Image (spheres, rainbow, N blue to C red):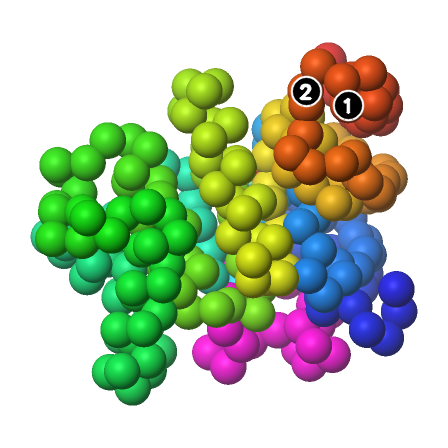
Amino acid sequence: MGSNAKVKVRHLTKKFGDLLVLDDVSFEVGDGDLLCVVGPTGCGKTTFLNSLTKIYDITSGEILLNDEPVDPGRHNISYIFQGDSTMPWLTVEQNVRFGLDIKGYPEARKREQVDKYLDIVGLDAYRGYYPKQLSASMLQRVGIARAFATEPELLLMDEPYGQLDIELRFKLEDELVKLWRLTGTTVIFITHNIEEAVYLGNRIMVLTNKPAGVKETLNDDLPRPRDITAPEFVELRNRVTDLIKWW
Ligand SMILES: Nc1ncnc2c1ncn2[C@@H]1O[C@H](COP(=O)(O)OP(=O)(O)O)[C@@H](O)[C@H]1O
Ligand SMILES: [Mg+2]
């Protein structure tokens, strides 16, 4: 990948006091990749994302976005956490506008982006609704529309669908894939769910247990839409499972 990688992580080490969480981690994320990062709970996945967004200072190493030290003040990075991220006092439309307001886009551009992404996620008819009037699935769609509306250079997702039931999860994963393919956004999607990683990613990075290092990075070229019962799918899922084996 080398020089045209979107994200370059070099010798990233993160300690909390004496606790070594990320141990000399190096990898790259290609422009337009949907990289799924799989690793056991507690291995340091959230710590890694928090290092990327500078919520945490790193102990040593560097993180580059477009070959510059990552800086959320200058780079356009969106972050989707687990659970409902909507603001209850704002309507659906205002929630999607929120990121654009922060970034100070001109009014016409805001309206255009809000309309486009509400339409894509199928919430156009609900723009005046408040979060408490929506289902869990719709709430997640508001979150993803908000994230994509700013057309981020990098979208970070931290186990966003971990708590949802399986049917809803697949629907939202399909929604994410649709938006990713439409926009070409570079996405880092964190999960401890192997099936989810194989279903979503075009690349899968498997982490070791704490302190986290990169065990292996695999390509996931299975045709889309993906069939979780297809032999190729099961085979790749088993390969990733063998790489992890944290139980
Ligand atoms: N702010 C913090 N202070 C001290 N220890 C932390 C902090 N954040 C995370 N950790 C520790 O770092 C390790 C990795 O945590 P985390 O990155 O949340 O794991 P994951 O997201 O993979 O489940 C855990 O042992 C956790 O207790
Ligand atoms: Mg976490």
Q: Nearer the viewer, residue 140 or 84?
A: 140
Circle 1 is placed at which residue position?
Answer: 233
- Count the marks: how many? 2
**Which residue is found at the position 76% from the left and 62% from the top?**
30
Q: Nearer the viewer, residue 168 or 223?
A: 223
**Which residue is found at the position 18% from the left and 53% from the top?**
127
Q: Is residue 155 visible?
A: yes
Quarter residue 207 falls in: top right
Name above or below for residue 89 compared with residue 32: above
- How crowded pointer 1 is (Cα within 10 Å; few <14, some 14-19, many 20+) is rated as some
Q: Nearer the viewer, residue 236 or 244?
A: 236
Prevalent SS, magenta region: loop
Callout 2 touching callout 1 (CB < 8 Å): yes
Q: Return the residue found at the far bottom.
A: 106
- Identify the secondary structure beneath mark 2: loop
- How crowded pointer 2 is (Cα within 10 Å; few <14, some 14-19, many 20+) is rated as some
Q: Position of residue 219 (x, y in %)?
A: 84, 42
The magenta segment is 55-77
Quarter residue 108 falls in: bottom left
**Which residue is found at the position 51% from the left and 27% from the top?**
170
Q: Position of residue 130 (x, y in %)?
A: 12, 46
Residue 228 image label: 2
Q: Position of residue 183 (x, y in %)?
A: 56, 62
Quarter residue 6 falls in: bottom right
In the picture, the quarter occupied by the N terminus is: bottom right
Q: Amino acid at mark 2?
A: Ile
Mark 1 or mark 2, which is nearer the start of the sequence? 2
Name above or below for residue 168 compared with residue 147: above
- Identify the secondary structure beneath mark 1: helix
